[in-house]
Amino acid sequence: MPTTPEMSMDMTNVGDPGLLDALQHEVAVFARRAEQTRLGGVGQVRNTMDRAAYLLLNRLDKEGPMGVKALAASMGIDSSTVTRQVAPLVDSGLVKRTSHPEDGRAVVLQLSPRGTARLEEVRSSRRQLMAELTHDWEPADRERFCALLTRFNTALSARTAVQPVTPPEQPPAS
């Protein structure tokens, strides 16, 4: 039976508890290691672009120029976060603000030529890191891992959209 946001299922007894424990542990280790290295690539480019910048530049490259609200919606974050994260990218010349082609009053964000070049430099470095980490994998294993990770991220994104992450409650100030 498919679930909807209105439905609540007790998922604690679905599947092998030992396997689910191992899975959650490996996801936690992956998250920590990914953050430690930022999966930033190799060589001089390693760790030279933070995750937020990379994801914003990548989205603009793949989807083209767009306004802050559209960019925020496509990334599943709020507009104020995008505004804050894009400001240093504009200041550094990686992103430029331009007039909307159909409505000159509206502003859109787009990669600058410098941003495009920088993004490709970082992608190339990260591509090299992925090649090194999986050099002894069969191509089918790489494809399967990518498909499963994409599926996992999609499920996580859908869950976050239904159940937004809220900060833990703070104890009352004394």
Image (spheres, rainbow, N blue to C red):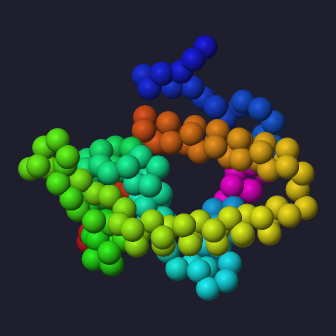
Decide: is 41 above or below 77: below
Quarter of the image for residue 73 reads top left
Task: Give residue 38's position: percent from left, percent from top.
Answer: 59, 71
Q: Visible in this render: residue 124?
A: yes
Residue 32 appears in the figure: no
Residue, x 78% and y 42% (percent of image)? 144
Which residue is nearer to you in this view: 63 or 55?
63
The residue at the far top in this view is: 1
Q: Which residue range is magenta in the image?
A: 21-29
Residue situated in front as seen by the camera: 88 or 125: 125
Q: Quadrant of the C terminus?
A: bottom left
Q: Position of residue 121 (x, y in %)?
A: 56, 72
Residue 13 is situated, as x and y percent measured from the top left of the image, at: 71, 31
Does residue 100 lie above or below 88 as drawn?
above
Overall secondary structure of the magenta section: helix
Above-or-below relation of 165 to 120: above
Left or right: residue 120 versus residue 64 is right
Residue 159, image x and y in percent?
50, 37
- Name the residue located 33 percent from the left edge and 78 percent from the top edge: 92
User: Residue at horizontal 47%, vertical 57%?
Assistant: 58
